[in-house]
C-alpha cells in the first residue's frame, strides 16, 4: 500500500500547521507512522490521496452515521447552500432542527445551537453556575468534555493519547473550582456530596464515556448522579456529544429512561450536524431561558445555527429511524464479536466493551471500569494491530483510547473483510 502522497502532504502540513494536524489524535502519535490524508468518502468507505480505499470505522468520530456523502444529505445541503452558506441571522432550518430534537427527547423544551461540543459544554457549565449561584463543577477522570480551561483536567482520549494529564496554559485559577473523581466510583461521589454538596453547581458526565475507550456506567451510576445533584440543589449535565442520536432515536438518556433519572442540561454534537460543525445544549425552559437575550447568561456565535449545518443535521436525523438503529446495533455486534474472536484465537488478552452501537477494545485481560484501568492496557500491541488493519484497508481510530463507529451503509462484504483482516492483524500483534 503506497503512502507516498500522504507523507508528502504531512511534511507540507507540518511546515504550516502545528504537528501537521488540526486535532491532536489525527497525528498518529499514539500508534506511530504517517496519518492518511483523506480526499473522498462514499457510503462505508473512504479514499486517501494515494488512492487507497478503506472501510471506515472512524466515521468522523460519529456523525457519518448514515455513511459518507449520503445522497439525501448532499441534496439538502446543496439546495440550502445555493441560497447562501451563512446569514448571521435566524433561519427556518435551525428552528426545524430544534423542533426535531425536542420531539426526540421528551424532557427537552428548548435548544441553543453552537458550533462545537466544547462550546456547548462551556455554555452548559456557565448556565449551571448562574442557575445555582455556586462555583464547583464535578467531572470524572477520563471523561472528555472539550478543551475549555475549566474542564481540561484529567480529560480523555486526546490528552491520554499524548500523555498529557493536564494542559500547559490552563491556570490554577481556571481549575480550582473543578473537582475530579474516578469514574464509576459511587462511594467517592456520595462522600463528596456529603462533604461539599451545598457548594456544587453541577456534575458533568459523558452519558457513557467514550473518550478513554468505551466504559459503560455501572448499573444505577447515572441515576445516582442525578439523585445526588437534585437532593443537594445541583444540576446534572449529561454530555451526549458522542451518544446523542447515535445509539438510539433519543440518545443514551431516552434509551435508559426507565431507570427514572432526568438530567438538567444535555449537550449534543456530531450527528446533529451531519458532518458539519454544529453542536447544542438543551434542557427545560426555566433553565435555558437564563441565556441571553431572555436572561443575563451571555453566549453568542456568528455561525451558531448555521443554515447549511442545521440542514445537514436535520437531513441526517430524518434518516435515523428505528430500522437504521437496529442495523447499527447489528453491525456493531458483528464487528465487535468478530474481532474479539480473532484476538482470542491469537491468544491476545483483551476486553471488548460496548454501549449501544459504540464499542472499543482494551488490550488488557480485565473489564475496564475507569481511567486507571484503561491506561494499564498494552497500547503497543494495539498499535501493531492498528497498522496491520490499516494496511489491509480497514481504518480504525488511531488510538487505543477511542470509540469505534459503524454506519448504516456497511455491507455484509464489509463485515467479512473487517473480520478477515482482524484474523491476520491479531497474529501480527501477538507476534510481538
Image (cartoon, rainbow, N blue to C red):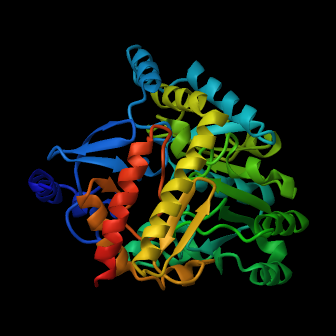
Name the side, left or right, on which 179 lies relative to 213: right
- Looking at the picture, how far across and down is residue 61, in whole percent? 45, 52
**Which of the two residues, 142 or 359, is positioned nearer the viewer here?**
359
Residue 244 relative to residue 341: left or right: right
For the point 27% across and 53% down, the residue is: 393
Quadrant hosting residue 194: bottom right
Q: Residue at x 51, y 61 (%)?
A: 336
**Residue 379, percent from left and from top:** 38, 79
Is 135 or 38 nearer to us in this picture?
38
Residue 204 appears left or right of 386: right
Task: Give the vertical position of 208 relative to 172 (above or below).
Answer: above
Q: For residue 211, say whether it is visible.
A: no
- Residue 395 falls in which quadrant of the image? bottom left
50 and 314: which one is in front? 50
- Number of numbered labels in the structure image: 0
Report the residue that reaches farthest toward the right.
Answer: 231
Q: Is residue 96 visible?
A: yes
Please state the horizontal and vertical placement of residue 7, each as a whole percent of the image.
12, 57
Q: Check the picture and name the quadrant holding the N terminus.
A: bottom left
361 displayed left or right of 122: left
Amino acid at each position: 500500500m503506497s503512502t507516498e502522497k500522504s507523507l508528502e502532504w504531512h511534511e507540507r502540513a507540518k511546515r504550516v500547521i502545528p504537528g501537521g494536524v488540526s486535532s491532536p489524535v489525527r497525528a498518529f502519535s499514539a500508534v506511530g507512522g504517517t496519518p492518511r490524508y483523506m480526499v473522498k468518502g462514499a457510503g462505508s468507505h473512504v479514499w486517501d490521496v494515494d488512492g487507497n480505499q478503506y472501510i471506515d470505522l472512524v466515521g468522523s468520530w460519529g456523525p457519518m452515521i448514515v455513511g459518507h456523502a449520503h445522497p439525501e444529505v448532499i441534496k439538502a445541503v446543496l439546495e440550502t447552500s445555493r441560497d447562501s452558506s451563512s446569514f448571521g441571522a435566524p433561519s427556518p432550518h435551525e428552528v426545524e432542527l430544534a423542533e426535531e430534537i425536542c420531539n426526540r427527547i421528551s424532557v427537552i423544551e428548548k435548544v441553543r445551537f453552537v458550533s462545537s461540543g466544547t462550546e456547548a459544554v462551556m455554555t452548559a457549565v456557565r448556565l449551571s453556575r448562574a442557575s445555582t449561584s455556586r462555583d464547583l463543577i464535578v467531572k470524572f477522570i477520563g471523561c472528555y468534555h472539550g478543551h475549555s480551561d475549566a474542564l481540561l483536567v484529567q480529560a480523555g482520549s486526546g490528552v491520554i493519547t499524548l500523555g498529557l494529564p493536564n494542559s500547559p496554559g490552563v491556570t490554577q485559577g481556571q481549575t480550582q473550582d473543578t473537582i475530579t473523581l474516578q469514574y464509576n466510583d459511587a462511594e467517592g461521589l456520595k462522600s463528596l456530596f456529603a462533604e461539599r454538596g451545598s457548594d456544587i453547581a453541577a456534575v458533568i458526565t459523558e452519558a457513557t464515556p467514550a473518550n478513554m475507550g468505551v466504559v459503560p456506567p455501572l448499573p444505577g451510576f447515572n441515576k445516582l448522579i442525578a439523585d445526588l445533584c437534585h437532593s443537594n440543589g445541583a444540576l446534572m449535565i449529561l454530555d451526549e456529544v458522542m451518544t446523542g442520536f447515535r445509539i438510539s432515536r433519543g440518545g443514551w438518556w431516552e434509551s435508559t429512561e426507565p431507570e427514572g433519572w432526568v438530567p438538567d442540561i444535555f449537550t449534543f454534537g456530531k450527528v446533529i450536524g451531519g458532518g458539519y460543525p454544529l453542536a447544542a445544549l438543551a434542557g427545560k425552559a426555566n433553565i435555558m431561558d437564563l441565556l441571553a437575550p431572555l436572561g443575563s447568561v451571555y453566549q453568542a456565535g456568528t455561525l451558531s445555527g448555521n443554515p447549511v449545518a442545521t440542514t445537514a443535521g436535520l437531513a441526517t436525523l430524518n434518516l435515523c429511524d428505528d430500522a437504521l438503529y437496529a442495523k447499527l446495533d447489528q453491525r456493531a455486534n458483528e464487528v465487535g464479536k468478530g474481532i474479539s474472536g480473532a484476538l482470542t484465537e491469537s491468544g491476545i488478552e483483551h476486553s471488548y466493551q460496548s454501549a449501544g452501537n459504540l464499542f472499543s477494545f482494551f488490550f488488557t485481560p480485565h473489564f475496564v471500569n475507569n481511567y486507571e484501568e484503561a491506561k494499564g492496557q498494552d497500547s503497543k500491541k494495539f498499535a501493531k494491530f492498528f497498522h496491520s488493519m490499516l494496511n489491509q484497508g480497514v481504518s480504525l481510530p488511531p488510538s487505543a483510547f477511542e470509540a469505534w463507529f459503524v454506519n448504516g451503509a456497511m455491507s455484509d462484504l464489509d463485515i467479512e473483510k473487517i473480520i478477515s483482516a482482524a484474523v491476520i492483524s491479531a497474529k501480527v500483534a501477538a507476534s510481538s
